[in-house]
Structure formats: C-alpha cells, structure tokens
Amino acid sequence: MRRGAAQMMLDQKLCLTGPWFICTTNRLYHRHHKETWFCTPQTCKEENSEAFAGQHARETSTSFYIFDEASAVPDKIFEVAEGGLTDGEPHIYLFGNPTRSSGKLHRVCFGNESGPASPWTHKSIDSRDCRMPNKELIQEWIATYGEDSDFVRVRVRGLPPAADELQFIDRERIKEAQAREPQSLDDDPLICGVDVSGGGAAWNVAAFRRGGDARSIPRIRIPGEHTRDRNVLVGKLAEILRDKRPGRVVAAMFLDMAFGSPIYERLRALGFHNVFEVNFGLTHTPDHTKANMRAYMWGEMKDWLLTGAIETDEKMAMDLAGPGYHINRSNLLVIESKADMQKRGQASPDDGDALALTFAQAEKEERDEDDEFGVYSGVNGPGSWMR
C-alpha cells in the first residue's frame, strides 16, 4: 500500500469507517482482527520492489494493493506486486492524477492495457463534474492556461498530458476540428473506413466521412473479442452497406488489408462491389513524399483537419495525437506503426486509422480499371466506386 503512515492516520480520522480500525506508524489493522485484516505502508522506490513480493492470503480472503499517486510508481513495483497476488481474490487499485503519458496508470486508463479485453476497470474523473472542488479556481486555471493545456488536462480533466514534440498531428488542430461546424455538399459521397481488429484488446472501428463532415454519423466500435468469428463483422458491415436511408448510402468502404482481407473477400462475394482493401505498407502512393500508404492517408487527414469537423470525443482526439513520425533516409515521411506505439505503452489508434482510411483515395478522381486503389466513376452515378 503506497501511503505514508502520517497520511494514513489523517485519512482514518476523516473516514466514516475510521472507528473500525487502529492506525499506528507501521500498520493499519481492524481492531477486532489484528492478524487477519491489516495494511502496511511501503515506499515505492524502485530499490524497494522486493517488499511487494509474495503477498499471500487464504483462499477465502482478499489480498490487495492500493497505489496512490500511481503515475509516479515505477513499473518494477507493479511487476513484483502483480506476481505476488496468487492466492485468494487479489485486487490492485491505482489512484492519482495522470501526470505522465507513460507508466502503468497511463497504460491501464488510456494506453494498450485499457482495451475491451483488459482485466482493469478504469474511470477518468473531471473535477468540474464533482461537487467539492473550487469551481472559481478551476475557471481561473482554464482562463489562464487554456482548457486543452497540459496543466488543465492533468489537474482538472483527469487526462494525461498531450504535449509531445514527436506527435504528427498537433492538439490545437484537433481541438479546432472538434469545435468547427461540419460542412459538406449534397453530392459529396459518404465514405466508410474500417480498421479491422486482430482480436483481443484492439477494436473494430467503422468511421464515416462526407466531405468536411466526419461528425454527423457516429463511428461504430466493436470489441475485437466479439469478432473472433469473422461472420459477425461481415454481417455488421453488410448491414451498413445495405442501408438505403437518405444520407446513409455508402459510396465506398475501405478496409485495412492486415486483418481485413477475409472480410473484403466475403463482402465482394456477397455482391458489394464498392468495397476496397487498402495495404497500409504499400510504397506506391499518390504522394511521392510519403513512405507508404499509411503515411499518405494520415498526411491527407492532417491537412483535412484544418477545415473538417470531427466528434468531440477524447478517444478519437488521443488516437489522432498518438502516433509519432520521422523522415527516413530517403527523405520520406514515416508514421509510427501500431507495434511501435504499443511498445511505448500507447493504445492502438484504431479510431484514428479508421478515419484515415476514408482518405485512401480522392473522392472524384478517375483511375484505371486495374488500379489497386479502386476507381471512382461518374458514369454509374454520383458517389459510386468501382474496380
């Protein structure tokens, strides 16, 4: 339990159940169950990691760790602590402001351990929604630093800092796109980008965009674990493609080839010829300053965000701001891969990739019949796509 003894004693005085316990400088215990119901404070310095090992309990008991200010706790502490919770019904609780965009707290709340298959239950609390915080002081901070500043994100909104000199899409651009009114023309085709999950922690995401409007039709998100049977996802995408309601007719659907090829083949076999697969690693792109198709689509999306409108949604914002970038030896733009992002604890940008897929090809560009991107044809009517 990462708490100082003095803080534990103060908390006991404020706690409704305080009279149940006795708190000393080295132990908090139940006054009637001294040997079986107790907590001991520990320092979370990395060199003290072995103090968190082997916290055994009876099969009918609950052994637990409570980490306060968890952003500052080294990963080594969590590694040892989790390895010691092998008996009873173990719990781990993490609390604190998300002061870092790395570490265990960030990963389980916002990163690659926060997905639908995660064993963690997480919640971010905005102090503006709580009764006790000083609302006038909070408004002063927002006026001084800005609502999307790292100070307000961390200390008020319960979100991790956003500043990162390596991020490809800046937060200011994302914030303006969230606030902008969506605009599109009547003949703008509705495009659907689908990022297909490989299962587990990642999501299947279908994002919709019509011209400058990527907000009016909400994204569809399906946990990867729910689509291990690919027929489930095929059925959902077929439902989208069959929708003939005004404003909902999809002109083209682009799927990520990595896990989407079987889905693409099945949808084509069902007669949906406005479905196309996209190879993110393809080096032949319309823009020869980009290393591959993923860099091309993210570059197009970044430019579009200067005039386009997206949902006011923190998940999408974090996805768009998540990937880093670099210029390779051939002077080409490379966007950080999902695998590299996950190595540094970042969540897979499934929503961001889904929106990026809507930029796989310009909406009204004529292409040859055998072009691997697919070809738009005005011959079959506005908004139709064909091979």
Image (cartoon, rainbow, N blue to C red):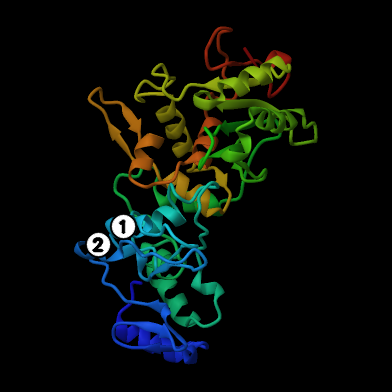
Q: Nearer the viewer, residue 58 or 145?
A: 58
Task: Measuring from the top left, give residue 363's x and y in whole percent.
Answer: 59, 25
Q: Tell me if I can see residue 97 in this picture.
A: yes
Q: In the image, is residue 80 above or below residue 192?
A: below
Q: Dot 1: few (<14), some (14–19), or many (≥20) neighbours within 10 Å? A: some
Q: Quadrant of residue 44?
A: bottom left
Left or right of 70, for residue 138: right
Query: If the image is split into quadrants, where does the N terminus sit?
Result: bottom left
Q: Tell me if I can see residue 212 in this picture.
A: no
The circle on residue 80 is: 1
Q: Amino acid at mark 2?
A: Glu
Q: In the image, is residue 36 above or below residue 309?
A: below
Is there CB contact under 8 Å for labels 2 and 1? yes
Q: Earlier in the sequence, mark 2 or mark 1?
A: 2
Q: In the image, is residue 357 above or below residue 5?
A: above
Q: Secondary structure at mark 1?
A: helix
Q: Quadrant of residue 285?
A: top left
Left or right of 325, for residue 245: right
Task: Measuring from the top left, give residue 350's x and y in whole percent.
Answer: 51, 39
Q: In the image, is residue 357 above or below residue 70?
A: above
Query: If the image is split into quadrants, where does the C terminus sit?
Result: top right
Number of on-image labels: 2
Q: Nearer the viewer, residue 181 or 8?
A: 8
Q: Amino acid at mark 1?
A: Val
Q: Secondary structure at mark 2?
A: helix
Task: Measuring from the top left, give residue 176's x and y in whole percent.
Answer: 49, 52
Q: Dot 2: few (<14), some (14–19), or many (≥20) neighbours within 10 Å? A: few
Q: Residue furthest left?
A: 47
Q: Nearer the viewer, residue 322 or 52?
A: 52
Q: Which residue is mark 2?
A: 50
Q: Residue at x 31, y 86 (%)?
A: 6
